[in-house]
Image (spheres, rainbow, N blue to C red):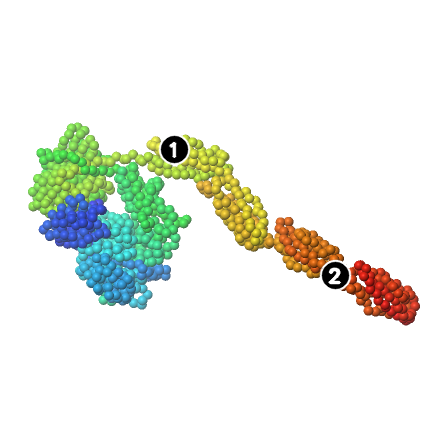
Amino acid sequence: MLVAGGVFLALVLGSGANASVSAQSTKKPATVPGELIVGFKPGVSESAQADALAQAGAKQKKKFKQIHANLASASENKLATVEKALASDPRVSYVEPNYVVTTSVIPNDPNFPDLWGMNNTGQTGGTPGADIHAPQAWDLETGSPNVVVASIDTGVDFSHPDLAAQQWVNPGENCGSSDPTFACAERSDGIDNDHDGYVDDWRGWNFVGNNNNPTDDNDHGTHTSGTLGAVGNNGIGVAGVDWNARIMALKFLDATGNGTDANAISAILYAADHGARVSNNSWGGAPSDQALLNAIEYGASKGMLFVAAAGNDGVDMDTTPEYPAAFDSDGLVSVAATDATDNLAFFSNYGANTVDLGAPGMNILSTIPGNSYDTFSGTSMATPHVSGAAALVMSHFPGATLYGTKALLMRSADVESSLAGSSVTGGRLNVFNAVSCSNTPEVVLTSPADGFTASIGDALSVRVIGSNCASPAGLGNVSVSVNGAPIVLSASSPDNGLYTGKYTVTAAGALAITASVTVGSSTATQSVSGTASQNYTCQDVTDPWVDVTPGTKLTNASNSDDGFSTLGITFPFTYYGQTYTTAYVSSNGFLTLGSSAGADAYANVGIPTPDPPSGLLAPFWDDLNPAGGGGGVYAGLTGGAGNHVLHVEWYQIPHFTLSSSGKVTFELSMYEATGKIVFRWLNSSFGNAAWDNGASATAGVENPSGSIGRQISFDQPLLTNGRSVSCALSAAPPPPSPSITTTSLADATRTQSYSQSLAATGGTPPYTWALASGSLPAGLSLDSASGAITGTPSAASGEYPFTARVTDSVSQSATKSLSISVADPLSVTTTSLPGGTVGQAYSQSVTATGGKSPYAWSVTAGSLPPGLTLNASTGAVTGTPTSSGTFNFTVQASDSGNPVRTATKALSISVVAQLVVNTTSLPGGTVGQAYSQTLSASGGTPPYAWSLASGSLPPGLNLAASTGVVSGTPTTAGTYSFTAQVTDGAQTATKALSIAVSPASTLSITTASLPQGRVLTGYSATLTAAGGTPPYTWSRIAGALPNGLTLSSSGTISGTPAKPGSYTFTVRVTDSLGATASKTFTVKINKH
């Protein structure tokens, strides 16, 4: 398809069940002559696959092991027979042609110089800021060579100076090196060194030429590669979104833009198996293709994000899907194109449910082969902006997954009113918002889409992506509710942020689905809404053929190509809850009820679709041509009143394309009594496998609005000869019985307020709660409406078992055995702790009461003395203190309850130094001489008390108990050993000491002479002595003292001399032991 000034690769792909398009065209997509893609069911071995191909007459050309498929070939004249044989083989899952890929390119404005999509300043007349905010993002992240992006395209010209450094190199074919500048002999040794099936694939692969040269010969692949990953900040050319990503070149389109479905699949599988984190896919525009979808899903299983261009047809892909962009795959991001004013580009496809976001795609300047640059337009140009952004996100968040990256890119897009309804996000890519994310919950509800329809009785698949920015790390709760009721989610394994669940639809009406993701205290939600309705269910039955050809031939339907006949129904027929009496019978193998619109439609589409024809009953909708020599279309009535059955038979009808070939016969029957519809196929072969057995037909039923239906087959050879299928409106299944989801209840504490709620799921709310047996603890009560158990328990400590019963609004009930444990309030009973001593073992325990034992102990504030620890299990404080001081701390007791109760107590331990006697020795004494020494101590807690623990002091000395003073006058010479003891009341210390007492020395008078005196003038002189044993006693033993003077016994001569003259006398000194000494003195008394 062509877009003015744009490039878009259109891949025409295969068809599969459940596709839905509205185009009225019988044009068959181009295929590779003589080739088929054959998918096999899980568990079919490779040898069995080869056997199936051989039995059908096909040759195996290539294996797609990853998706259990093969590329097979057969001669063109036998291809239809081979395809039919394979389709009937029970080992085969699907058979599809190998479709052809085409491309159309119209470059625009080769001299356009500016990358407005990266940074829009209005330079092209656009809106400033209508860009992906790349410069701001580059301030945070410029990419990593560890992130590989596969360019699945026309190849890449890595000789371009803006791309040369970005080339991915396969280390398995380059001696283990991924450096593009390191050339190893393995690159060209002709050996498949890494055993991947590709010889010398050191730089990717060329699937067109089946060689190792993926160089671009078209421009397209080089252009998209430049946008996603051209080197930035190198002073030349342009800059890609990611400056450092490695680009894996996988060429599957030739120089004219042609390629094959098989080669596209091969390229995707190669990228996934060789570590690509992102694949850029700027091609598309085809019908659904199961093999291609399987390849994309395989890539997702390997962690590769598939970024696809939405297409350039300007159509709504919700109603006219183009693939691969429209595939419902969580690992795929579908990209629309925006212009410089943040409007949807005029050519871009869109879809509120099938396109994820927009990106700049109009007049995009990028690299082209030959060291040149050019501007192209298209969703092809928008897609690499997103691929490059994905690579930048994966570089910035090391734990990013493909699903988390998808969620972050979608959630961080700039929502623009001009893009409302164009995509799921209604926004344009903003890579700065993405890489600046920090601990932010991201949620994307990928299925179902907003506005979905569901059928009663069906299991609705719900899929949600949850991430913390782009990673599941740090992710909190991920939940989904339907109309407020939670559903069970299962995380993918390994956990990569994708969660899935099922919801069984039980009633008609509105459905609101809300997904919620938390990170820390932040929560992100996304909601979609839809409608549930009754639908038909269809199943194979054994039902006899009813020949209607004797009945009424419907003229217009029988004699025209693309005509219909109006048929009156003789009984009121109820279809999807409405009653009809008229049917419009088409020559093309179906009838409609309620409207003739589209009753002449010849191009079958999938069911359901809102486009006419609607109210559809289709046993074999195809481009049939009764006027081309067919037998005709007949109607007939059987049964009686109340049990009529209307039969419509298409008898011997040729295909418009195969008028000269075989003819098919089939019918439908409409039952008055039950409203059921039965389809029967008597002969469904035209003699050409491409059309036989419904290979190009639709079978099923659809409601008048086209919102729901039941498809039996769409373009699949399933309508085989002799098959019968009965379709009946499904009754609403009985609601599932309720169940109590509460598995346990929190413990209660006496005298403290309590509140817990019982919860249930299933059944039909509202619920009523009651006790089936047992009783709640005294003080608590159960609210019958809410299931809340509240109150203040007064019951004694213990377990209180009971059985709760929930009853829903239709009297279904469920019970659950539960119990509530009651305990006294928890408290720490220890009020103080004794002190400790440095260096001495310490052992004390803190205790608690109440709560539920055993307790866990911890210090929540302060600290224990160094050297002491608290045993978490026993509460013992033990150890040997190493430092003195007062240490304040808070202990916490935690019980074993649910929830855990806690109690705290502020305590302290005073640690003193160890008591020691500091005195190490005492000086000696002398008999008769006064003695005084003080013993000293430290540590402990003063005051101290001193005593002798053993031995004795020298006679004449004693120890003061309160001061430690040893004092007195020794009376006996000798060495006296003793042990001094000090105590502070708590500690006692001792020290072994001794005092040596020396004998007294010889007594002598030491006064040498006496001073002269004067008559009538007071006189005083004191005699001194040494040695002996004091005290001394003095006396005069000879001569006479001057008149008026006297000698005291203490040795003092005093008085007032009366006469002058010289007076000689002798004095004696006697010590306490009776020793004496004498000396003669002369005192002169002067007259004047």
Q: Is residue 1026 above or below residue 354?
A: below
Which residue ends up furthest to the right in the rendered image? 1059
The type of residue carrying mark 2 is Pro
Residue 128 picture quarter: bottom left
Q: Secondary structure at mark 1?
A: strand
Q: Are marks 1 and 2 in contact (CB under 8 Å)?
A: no
Residue under the image location 50 percent in, 37 percent down? 750
- Sequence order check, earlier mark of 1 and 2: 1
Q: Is residue 83 left or right of residue 342?
A: left
Of residues 94 and 1078, the one drawn nearer to the viewer in this rendering: 1078
The type of residue carrying mark 1 is Arg
Residue under the image location 30 percent in, 41 percent down? 503
Of residues 870 and 25, the one drawn nearer to the viewer in this rendering: 870
Question: Can you tell which mark lies on residue 732?
Answer: none
Q: Secondary structure at mark 2?
A: loop
Which residue ends up furthest to the top in the rendered image? 641
Residue under the image location 26 percent in, 57 percent down? 274
Q: Is residue 956 above or below residue 572?
A: below
Question: Can the viewer see residue 943?
Answer: no
Where does residue 968 sit, x and y in percent of width and height? 74, 57
Residue identifier under label 2: 999
Residue identifier under label 1: 805
Q: Could you tell me which quadrant the C terminus lies in?
A: bottom right
Question: Can the viewer see residue 927?
Answer: yes
For the residues labelled 1 and 2, the Cα–Cα distance comes to 106 Å
Closer to the eye: label 1 or 2: 2
Where does residue 917 sit, x and y in percent of width and height? 64, 56
Where does residue 232 sit, x and y in percent of width and height? 31, 64
Of residues 118 and 751, the one drawn nearer to the viewer in this rendering: 751
Q: How many neighbours does mark 2 have within 10 angstroms: few (below 14), some (14-19), or many (20 or more)?
A: some
Where does residue 771 sit, x and y in percent of width and height? 41, 32
Q: How many neighbours does mark 1 have within 10 angstroms: few (below 14), some (14-19), or many (20 or more)?
A: many
